[in-house]
Image: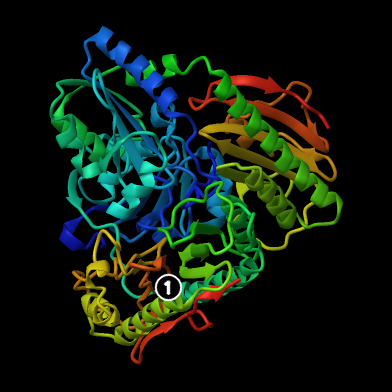
Amino acid sequence: MLTLHPVVLRGRTELPFSADELSARVATVQRELGGAGVDALVAFGDARSYAPLAWVTGMVPMLKWAVAVVPASGETELYSALPGARDLRRVRTLAHVGSVAPIGQLAGGLARFRRVMVAGLRSMRARTEDAIRGAVQVLDGGDQLIDRLSAVPSERERELLRGASEAARLAASETVSACQSGAGAVEALLRGDLAAREAGMHDVRVLWSPDAGLPLRPLAGETAVDRDPLVFYFAVETGGYWGEALACAGGPATLPAALAPVARLGLSVQEGVEDQLTPGFYSRRSLDASGVPCSQTIEVG
Amino acid sequence: MSTADAALEWVVHLHDGVHSYLECNPVFALTGVRTIGEAAVIVGRDGAITLLAAPACDGARLRELASCPVLACDDVAGELAARVSGRVGVAGLDDVASRFRRALEACTLVRLPSDTGRAKSDDELAAARRASAIAEQAYDELLGALRPGVAEYELIARLDVDVRRRGADDHFVLCSSSPIGDNVRAPTARRLEPGDVVNLEISPSVDGQFIQICRTAVLGRAGVRRRADYALIVAALAAGAAAARPGATVAQVVAALDAPLIDAGLAEYCRPPHIRVRGHGQGLASLSPGDITFDNDTVLEEGMMFTLHPNQRFPDSGYMLCGEPIVVTAAGGVALTHRQPGLDEC
């Protein structure tokens, strides 16, 4: 999601899948590694970009980043960049992985391997990449492996996507209702945000147009703004899966300036949306953790 | 660090756009902007500052907010490579993706620290005061919502939105609820029960300046033992604050803070793993004076600001929180908050 990253992910936090599912995913990865003659997969994820880590372990880092090491045989290990022993106890609550160690121990943990694949290199911090490359030979193909394994969402994942989409729609609906009842733009957006969080979403992002027609931007401490029309966008996440909603409240808004950044954000411009954004909801698009659309719904309210 | 130092032709500060309460964001410190993506601030020999930041579509917002010229682009590393050469001072190189290292491989690099700040500016202190007021008001409001049956995440959702409704631009918040006080963490689906100890770290920011208050509330009556234990950490906070004078070291502040607890036989509980730190600097800009620990010899200066929190585990009462944002003055550390620290009963 190309939105402003909050300092901490602070919505409902729980283990996204069972220990059995973790075992099944790890087993799938291990079969692939064995078939390719690779010693381990190193899956990176930070609080913003976490697809490889989240697909393998279910973990979405609330702060900083973490690395999962899945050996071709044996137990999966997590290495966290959080600073203290007390923080590592928190990390143990975010995934069913029994071994959690500080990121400083990653190089030592990899020393028993010779050749590894790495997924998430593009987002990985240089110092972590240095630690990996200093310990083992890094082979290409880690990201492609995760992409291939995650291409077809399970029913559980589709349920998460449906939930995220519903929560995004709920947030947009609450915002529109608040506008209709006379609330200012910021208050209306905050009510939508609250609705998504109370619906159990782990992460909620809001973009809006403070002056209809300008590119959408994050809320930044504004307290009282009246905007008619109000063009806004919600992205909400649960278990690592996102739902989105773009909506307009009040009068019609001029395109394409308002939508250009939204399209850039990965939200497709729906057929039938041409020159003007009239009041209502325009799209709900579900994405999996790798950004691949799983379902797409067009709704004009 | 300026280019005059070490005969540098350029100084570059890098940030990955993943904003952290625990780390200095030099891009924000130099430009006043929180970027959506990766960013680089380039300082030339003439002192001119330029912000390179991703994504390109965020350009209008960045140009409106930044105190310097902005190039919004989708390839910050590539644009950086095209703009700097020769002897370059660089900060943050290890904490961004390695493509930045590759972008600068033709340069002679001099590694610089990301955080060179000291005391807070008048604007930062003013923002901190506003943030402190928001935290206190939101906490008072939250006390009315603490009741059995409400889920942790519902509680934090209401607190978070309330904080932002009052004008915060971001919010770092952790919580816990349990029959015996527990370490704070992200909110879960656990529903509050009578007698629960609710611990909260509430850390709003105004104009990118964070503060933190740490609070403990009990759903019901706290009990004599718990009240006595909490009184100890209130005394510890007062002792630590009194020691926070210009010329004292952070370690001396911690020693003063720990003294009432050690005198009460809790020496073992005043060190890791029972605690991490006794406080910390407040970002997004400088985190000076750093973590408030027994081994931090940073000398305090007037105007430095940090959270002082003798959050403490007790053998009988579990973990409880007490913390305030403190400014160093000649008369000792002065809290930016207004209420006297105390254990709340709901």
Residue situated in front as seen by the camera: A290 or B180? B180
Q: How is the image coloured?
A: rainbow
In the image, is B344 to the left or to the right of A276?
left
Secondary structure category for the residue under label 1 = loop
Under mark 1, the amino acid is Gly
Q: Residue B79 appears at what percent x and percent y?
A: 37, 38
Q: Quadrant of the C terminus of chain B?
A: bottom right
Label 1 crowd bin: few (<14), some (14–19), many (20+), radius 10 Å: many
Residue situated in front as seen by the camera: B106 or A186? A186
Which residue sits at x=83%, y=40%? A252
Residue situated in front as seen by the camera: A287 or A218? A287
Q: Residue A201 appears at what percent x and percent y?
A: 60, 41
Which residue sits at x=27%, y=67%? B269
In the image, is A53 to the left or to the right of A171?
left
Q: Residue A222 appears at what percent x and percent y?
A: 65, 61
Whether residue A84 is visible, yes or no, is: no
Residue situated in front as seen by the camera: A13 or B335? A13
Q: Residue A281 appears at what percent x and percent y?
A: 77, 34
> Against A210, is B208 above or below?
below
Residue A257 falls in image quadrant = top right
In the image, is B205 to the left or to the right of B276?
right
Q: Quadrant of the N terminus of chain B?
A: bottom left
Whether residue B302 is visible, yes or no, is: yes
Tag count: 1
Residue receiving disc 1: B323
Residue A48 falls in image quadrant = top left
Which residue sits at x=16%, y=23%? A113
Q: Chain of mark 1?
A: B
Which residue sits at x=13%, y=26%? A112
Q: Residue furthest top?
A: A35
